[in-house]
Image (cartoon, rainbow, N blue to C red):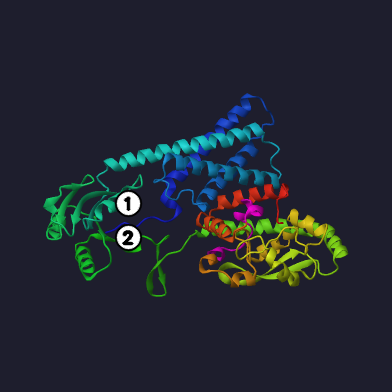
Amino acid sequence: MYKTNIRSWLKHLDFILLDILAITLAFGASYLIRENIGLGLRDDISYRSLYLTVAGFHILTAILGQGYSNIIRRGRIEEAKNVLRHTLVLLGCVMLYLVFTKQSEPFSRIFLGCLFAFTLVFTLFFRLLLKRWIRESLKKSEKLSKLLILSRGRHIERCLRQLNDVQYQPFHIVGIVLLDEDASRREEICGIPVVADSETMLEYIRLNAVDEILVYADAITDKTRALTDQFLQMGIAVHISLDQLLGALPHRQFQHLGELNVITTSFQTAGMANLFLKRLMDICGSLVGLLATGIAFLFVAPAIYIRSPGPIFFSQERMGQNGRKFRIYKFRSMYMDAEERKKELMAQNKIQGQMFKIDNDPRIIRGVGTFIRNTSIDELPQFWNILKGDMSLVGTRPPTVDEFEHYQLHHKIRLSFRPGLTGLWQVSGRSDITDFEEVVKLDEEYIANWNLWLDIKILLKTVKVVLNQKGSE
């Protein structure tokens, strides 16, 4: 019988309990330091409430942020980065909670600083200690699953490298079966004994302890299927690797489409928890942004109308995720005939490719138009698009319909992600980029490496860019 992996948070209950212990010790140490330096304002009820809040946020953010995913396989440096990132997110959540609930007064900055510093140190120390104990225990354990590998001789070293690339494996490789060679010619490969060949493997399996078999095959053939059936009749779990056939496919997943079993591959994948948090961040950010839009409207609207009578808002059809059309909204920063005059100015376009930008654009309303573009105030109405779900706070900028119609095939990767108010190329010296292919590369880099932390860093850089008045030209 093959034991399936636990996919819920219960799989890492030991690390969750250890993290709670780390928080408890960090809280106690911080409280003692506070008492010893005589800060006063002793309020045990408030501190007990804060302890429960910190512990709750710690577990919630760790589970939703997939902080326990592959925790055993992570090395020391990777684990340190993970704990640091998680502690910073935890600090932000707790501080926002204390501010919005008006409960921050009883807690000194020294106490909070010590709390999060100790949480970082204790959490990392306990995690590394537990992982070391687990790995050492498994190495000595006789309960590890015994894995036998079936492969062709030319592929076996690559197979072993892939199996040993990570620090932790829940199995022990007992031997290698060479399907296309005589086993007597090679005693061992990479320290693993060669125990049989295609003629003697069934006898070896019959007489020796084997829990699982990995068939490292080029493709599923009739012979592979027949072998699998024989192994299953012997009660042995079988893994079939199609790495030679599917190795170039990224983010492979086995799924069901109706009654069909399919292998799904995509350029990037994201967990439901991360997508939920990204959407939650979009909603919260858009609500704040719409409040700022309303305030800006009181000042911007009269200035626009005085300089160029007509609508205050500008709307235009844009291409959204995977080619879905939607209407984008901005404060109007150009004269009413801007679209007609664009054709006359195409010769001055300084971007090579499917975007349009010129220096000293004569279509921009003098004074107010230049100001709201340099400060990015003209982008504020797009928070309505974000609230509706057409856009996100961070993504790739949506092209116009006519730009999209001239896209080459590889350009469409920009649309595989929900378009954003800001993005990686906007905070990477966008005024200096004059080649559309460079824009595509930056967008592709963002999509390939996307995570919530990257979004947060881009948002912080965007604030810096806007404050330095390096907005759109």
Q: Is residue 288 visible?
A: yes
Numbered circles on residues, count = 2
For this view, does 221 lie left or right of residue 312? left
Check disc 1 and report the residue beneath it.
162
Q: Is residue 420 magenta?
A: yes
Task: Give whichever of 325, 83 is nearer the camera.
Answer: 325
Q: Amino acid at mark 2?
A: Asp
Write the start and end of the magenta stretch as one range: 413-433
Q: Amino acid at mark 1?
A: Gln
Check disc 2 and report the residue beneath it.
243
Q: Residue at x 70, y 60 (%)?
A: 358
Q: Residue at x 35, y 44 (%)?
A: 167
Q: Are marks 1 and 2 in contact (CB under 8 Å)?
A: yes
Q: Residue furthest right?
A: 306
Task: Give whichever of 280, 370 is nearer the camera.
Answer: 370
Q: Secondary structure at mark 2?
A: helix
385 vs 467: above or below = below
Other residues around mark 2 within 10 Å, as few (<14) / some (14–19) / many (≥20) = some
Task: Give whichever of 278, 351 is nearer the camera.
Answer: 351
Name the image quarter holding the N terminus: bottom left
> Based on the displayed image, in which of its 4 quarters is residue 396 positioned?
bottom right
Q: Give the percent coordinates (x, y) of residue 326.
A: 65, 71
For this view, does 3 lie left or right of residue 435? left
Q: Is residue 162 magenta?
A: no
458 vs 244: above or below = above
